[in-house]
Structure formats: C-alpha cells, structure tokens
C-alpha cells in the first residue's frame, strides 16, 4: 500500500489533471472506468452496485463490463460481497468502517464517500481527488454534502486532502461576503411589472364578474333561463381572482423587501437581505397554502349544494331568497380561491428571489454580474 490514495472520477474539469503515469499512489476508480479504458491503470475499482447491474449485458456504460470482471487480474474489485465469477472481487469492509466511525457510520450517499472513508480507514496519509464535481442539483444534490463530510473527517484525522476542483469548496463566506445581495433596483423593477400585471387582471375580473352577476340575476327573474352556466362563470371569476391575488401576493413580497432595504440604507448607509429571508417566507406561504385547502373545499361544497337547490327553485320568491344565499356563497368561494392565490404568489416570488440569490452566490462575479443575473431573473 502506498501512502497516497488517488480518487479519480470522470468529470472532465479536473480528470486530466491527474498524471496517469504516476506510480507513487494507489488509484481508486469507479464502476466501468477501467473496463472501458477511461484510465490507464487502477489499483481498486469500486463496483458497489447489486449483481443485477454489473452482470447485465444491458449495462449502459459498458456492455462487456461483466466479461471484463470475470477476466480482470490487474485491480481489486470492491463489491458488496465476494463472488466466485469475479476472481478479483473483495467484499467492501463496510461493517469495519462503520465500527471505525461512530456517529456517522451510515452517512454514505455516494460511492466517492465510501472511497474516502476507506482511504481513512486503511491508513493512507494523503488523499488526492480528481474528476469529482457533483455540480448538478438533481442526482448529486444529496451526494455532495457526503463527500464534503468525509473530507472533513480526513482533515480532522490529520490526513492531507488535495481536492482538485475550482468549485467544490468555493462559496461566499457566511457573514463576511455579504456584499452579494439582490439590488434594490431589481425589486423596484419587479414591483412595477407585478403592479401592471395585477391591474390588467383586475380589469378582466371586473368584466367577468358583471357577466356572472347578470346571468344569475336573469335566472332570478326567470327560472327558464336556467343555471347550467353558473359554475362556468363563477369559476372564471375565481380563476381571475386567484391570478390577481397571485400578482398581489408577489407584489407584497417585493414591497416588503423594498421597504426593508430603504430602512436599512437610511440607518446604516447600505442594505443586505440574506437568502434565509426569502426561504422563510416561501416556507411559511407553502404551509399556509396547504392549510387553506380545507377552506376551499368547504366553500366549494357549500356552493355546489346551494346550486342544487336553485335547480328546483321554480317559485320566484323562494328562488330569489336562494339566489341571495348563492351570491353570498359565491363571494366566499371566490375569496377562498383568491386567498390561495396570495399564498401562491408569495411562495413563487420568494422562490424566484432564492433562485436569483443562488445564481449570484454561485457566480460571485462582482456587482455588475449580480445586477445582470438579477435582471435576467426578473424577466423569467
């Protein structure tokens, strides 16, 4: 065993930085990298998938991988168990590693995490990592923290870790790099767009409400007019109310932030809003929206029941009283749908601001880049 373990992934950003002619290190690779010829050599191959994966000819990365496993004599193959058809297979010492790291014994969300843990467990004095970025927000979102954690364990045990990546451990310093924030101008531009959108939808809502009200009043006067169209007109009004309040909820968010920025600027000469501000507001709105769904159902059910009564209200006096009751329920239903729109607007706008802030922090490219990104987010 050499004193240095090299963990080699396939990300092209830093894969080529490793000199594959080196002989002063043990090389760890993953899955089909060696069988496909992606690397010149390896001492350990981590193939920790279940046999149904590596024995299959349908392997999407290398259809001949199983044949290679059966004939390989150059590298140890770490697997979930030892298999007679894979002569170089060795059972990965998971139980021993779990016992060696009490408190984090089951925190493995990626094979790279297993590789780092093994290098620590086996006694390597230095760990070099190439070709590992995990930069997407889908498959790797829960894997990236695992790699960071096991690097921390290695650091804590006095092992030198040389992580070749320009981005993996790059992030603004919390509390220190606080200059990256969404500009006040972005909020003000967003407020203008939202106000214009709300004004347009409000005009459409008022027109739709007149049509709905006229239709209901015509039925009040004449039973033969019927009430089959009521649901369509009521839902049209409710949808517009929801859309208006979605704009309004989003507008309330940016107006609050505008006010906060101006107050901070007046008090301190500058302003800064952290991502947590947007995240807290988004989470609160999501919880409120979920709780409000029960109110919508109650209003909807009450409206449907009253409409059934209208279908048999042939007597003008009886029908008129039922219409009055129906109109009250219509207002309650529209109000309930509209309130959901406010919660949705708050949540969507807060998420939009979180996305802008995340872009800014990832780029960390100065005030001009922040402004450009923020303005691009506003138009999205």
Image (cartoon, rainbow, N blue to C red):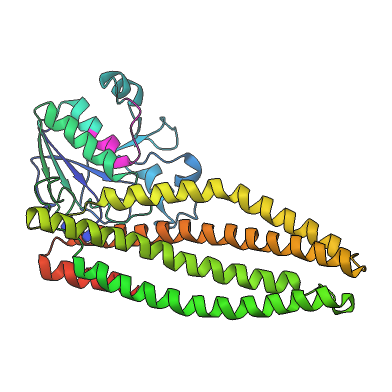
Q: Nearer the viewer, residue 13 or 248?
A: 248
* Residue at 15% over, 45% down: 174
Is residue 140 something that shows in the picture?
no
Query: How far from the left and from the top, in percent, is residue 47?
Result: 36, 41
Quadrant of the snapshot with the N terminus: top left
User: In the shown orientation, is residue 328 left or right of residue 206?
Assistant: right
Q: Nearer the viewer, residue 330 or 356?
A: 330
User: In the shown orientation, is residue 345 left or right of residue 130?
Assistant: right
Image: 3 above or below 236: above
* Residue at 39% over, 63% down: 250
Q: Nearer the viewer, residue 285 or 328?
A: 328
Residue most toward the front?
317
User: In the shown orientation, is residue 301 left or right of residue 133?
Assistant: right
Query: How far from the left and from the top, in percent, is residue 329?
Result: 69, 59
Query: How far from the left and from the top, in percent, is residue 72?
Result: 33, 43
Q: Which residues are magenta?
A: 105-116
Specify whether residue 320 is painted magenta: no
**The image quarter in which residue 184 lies:** bottom left
Quadrant of the snapshot with the C terminus: bottom left
Specify whether residue 115 is painted magenta: yes
- How many marks overall? 0
**The image quarter in which residue 86 lies:** top left
Image: 304 above or below 80: below
């Amino acid at each position: 065993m050499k004193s240095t373990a090299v963990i080699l992934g396939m990300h092209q950003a830093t894969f080529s930085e490793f000199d594959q002619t080196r002989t002063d290190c043990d090389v760890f690779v993953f899955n089909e990298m060696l069988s496909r010829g992606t690397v010149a050599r390896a001492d350990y191959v981590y193939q920790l998938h279940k046999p149904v994966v590596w024995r299959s000819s349908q392997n999407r990365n290398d259809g001949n991988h199983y044949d290679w496993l059966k004939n390989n004599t150059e590298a140890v193959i770490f697997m979930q168990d030892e298999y007679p058809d894979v002569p170089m297979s060795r059972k990965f010492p998971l139980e021993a590693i779990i016992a060696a790291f009490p408190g984090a014994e089951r925190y493995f969300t990626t094979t790279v995490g297993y590789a780092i843990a093994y290098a620590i467990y086996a006694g390597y004095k230095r760990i070099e990592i190439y070709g590992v970025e995990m930069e997407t927000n889908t498959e790797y979102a829960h894997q990236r923290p695992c790699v960071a954690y096991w690097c921390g364990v290695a650091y804590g045990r006095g092992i030198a870790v040389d992580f070749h990546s320009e981005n993996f451990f790059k992030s603004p310093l919390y509390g220190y790099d606080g200059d990256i924030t969404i500009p006040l101008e972005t909020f003000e531009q967003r407020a203008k767009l939202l106000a214009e959108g709300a004004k347009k939808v409000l005009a459409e809502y008022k027109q739709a409400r007149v049509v709905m009200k006229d239709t209901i009043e015509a039925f009040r006067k004449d039973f033969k007019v019927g009430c089959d169209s009521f649901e369509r007109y009521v839902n049209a009004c409710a949808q517009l109310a929801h859309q208006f309040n979605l704009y309004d909820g989003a507008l309330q968010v940016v107006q609050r932030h505008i006010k906060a920025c101006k107050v901070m600027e007046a008090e301190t000469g500058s302003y800064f809003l952290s991502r947590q501000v947007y995240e807290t507001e988004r989470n609160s709105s999501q919880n409120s929206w979920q709780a409000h769904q029960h109110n919508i159902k109650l209003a909807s059910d009450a409206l449907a029941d009253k409409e059934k009564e209208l279908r048999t209200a042939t007597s003008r006096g009886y029908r008129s009283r039922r219409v009055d009751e129906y109109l009250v329920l219509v207002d309650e239903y529209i109000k309930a749908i509209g309130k959901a729109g406010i919660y949705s607007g708050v949540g969507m706008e807060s998420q939009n601001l979180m996305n802008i802030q995340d872009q800014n922090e990832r780029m960390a490219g100065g005030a001009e880049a922040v402004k450009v990104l923020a303005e691009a987010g506003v138009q999205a």
